[in-house]
Amino acid sequence: MQLDYKDIIIKHYALSMSGSEIARQAGFSKSGVNDFLRAFKKCEDLSYPLPAGITNYGIALKVYGAVPGSGGRNENIELPDYEDAAKLMATRKNMTLMFLWNRYKKKCEEEGARFYQYSQYCELYNKWCEENYETAHFDAIIAQKMEVDFAGQTFSMTDPLTGEIMAIVVFVAILPYSQYIYAEGMLSTKEPQWIEVNNHALDYFGGVPALVVCDNCKQAVIVNQDWIEPELNKDYADWADHYGTVILPAKVRKPKFKSSVENAVGILEKGFFHKLEERQYFSLEQFNKDLWKELEALNKEPFKKKEHNRYYYWEEEQTELMPLPSMHYEYMERKTAKVSSDFHVRFDNAYYSVDKAFLHKKVSIKASSTVVRIYSLAGEFLCEWPRATRKGQWSTNPEHLPDHYKGFTQWNGPYFIQKAQLIGKNTETVIRTILKSRPYEVQTYRMCLGILNFTKKYSNKTLEECCKQAIALNKQKYTFIKNTIAVVADDLGEAGYHHPTSAKKEPVRGGYVMPPEASSIDTLLSRSKALADQIREGADE
């Protein structure tokens, strides 16, 4: 936690509080407070009472000769005068950080000194403003930053194929200077989709700001204990490097550090979000189409307390944004998978076909938020698919299948039908129906195998009865069998299971199994006589 130098000095000299008392009251470390007080007393350029208007920045500069929070700063680089820059930004109309940085850069070049790059200059300026927010207030600066967050309100979407109710989360981004807002609905908030919506936000704004202020969500930040040196998500940090910007997470539980996006979320939730929640959606595309239509109207709606609208100020701000690179940053997931007997690999709960030459072989999968690419382990490119948008989706290229694939592997239609015939006619009917339920028969093999494998736990009679119910209800699907077979087995009792627990018998351990005649009286007498004769012969010898 950054020490509040002015507060410490006032409490120590005006209120006669000790360093320990100040540390306990303010939540600082005792050694940190006492070390500062000792350094302050030794300082020849500063004493109590403090000069009027001096900031924590100024105090630290005189006492330590360094900037608060700039630990590890390269002393060989010329430090900008941020106090002067802040005054110019607050008093000069249309003043920009780009102009001030160019002036700072030119001065350093004339003096032969090293200087900060533009993104570093903006990052340090923003930190300086945050550390001195109690003694100064600064208006939003053109093209300085973009703030991003998730809206608290979610929406519902019904999958038209499965009927599943899915939640839509809304991503929100804003340029604080123009208050220009971008928003997009998401079905997943994992890293690939997070990177994608950040790409879309920069496209919408038409450029890249110097800073991106984000919440402490796991997609962006791993650890943010002291705010000065947060540990960023590697993919998000790479995204920032690609665009030449800097990620600056907000302080934990401090909404004011991203007040513009918090305000934007409030405007959306109190405004046209009410219209959207009254509508029923069956696709994310339709939701975003409605969202963007309402958003365009909002950005062009006149402000109530000042002239013009968000779009007007964005046109001005866009000219100051850094240019977009020629290509988007693309997040890639990586996985190794084995091609199954149905010529498909499974990735993220969806199935993608691979050429028959790689049957039962391992392949490498690289996937972005929109594309799945499959390679051999040697790095040879095999095929590319649009990424599935729902669980259980199949993507099959007929050219990947052999000409007579029905007899190509152990998994084929006749194989599953033959297995089903051994169980009963109802099971056979269900298997035949499932084999015809998809465009390509190979897409059904896993479901057929799943149904037949229920006989490992349940009896054939149970599966037959379950399939009979499925036929009667016209629900000849794997999910119906899966969800009802346990109930059918319980109704049948011991006969419902393949190995009833009551029928199990403990094996005789360590015993020797003899034929029945071995224990007859004649056998025992003859053995006794033979043993006696052996003993007698041994005594005579």
Image (tube, rainbow, N blue to C red):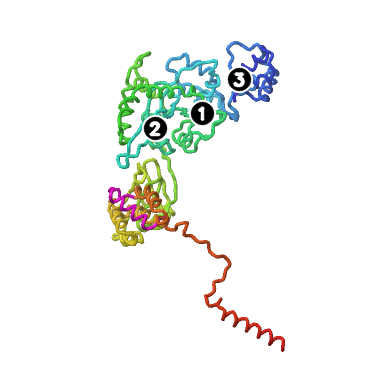
Q: Amino acid at mark 1?
A: Gln
Name the residue that disc number 2 marks: 169
Observer-nearest of 468 and 286: 468
Q: Position of residue 81 (x, y in %)?
A: 55, 20
**Residue 348 in view (yes/no):** yes
> For the C terminus, which image quadrant?
bottom right
Name the residue that disc number 1 marks: 120
Q: Secondary structure at mark 3?
A: loop
Q: Earlier in the sequence, mark 3 or mark 1?
A: 3
Please identify the quarter of the rendering in which residue 2 is found: top right
Read off the magenta span. Answer: 457-477
Give me the disc on residue 4.
3
**Residue 343 in view (yes/no):** no
Circle 3: is it few (<14), some (14-19), or many (20+) Cα within 10 Å? some
Observer-nearest of 310 and 516: 516
Judge whether 198 appears above or below 110 on screen. below
Q: Position of residue 155 (x, y in %)?
A: 36, 31
Based on the picture, tell me whether residue 467 belongs to the magenta stretch. yes
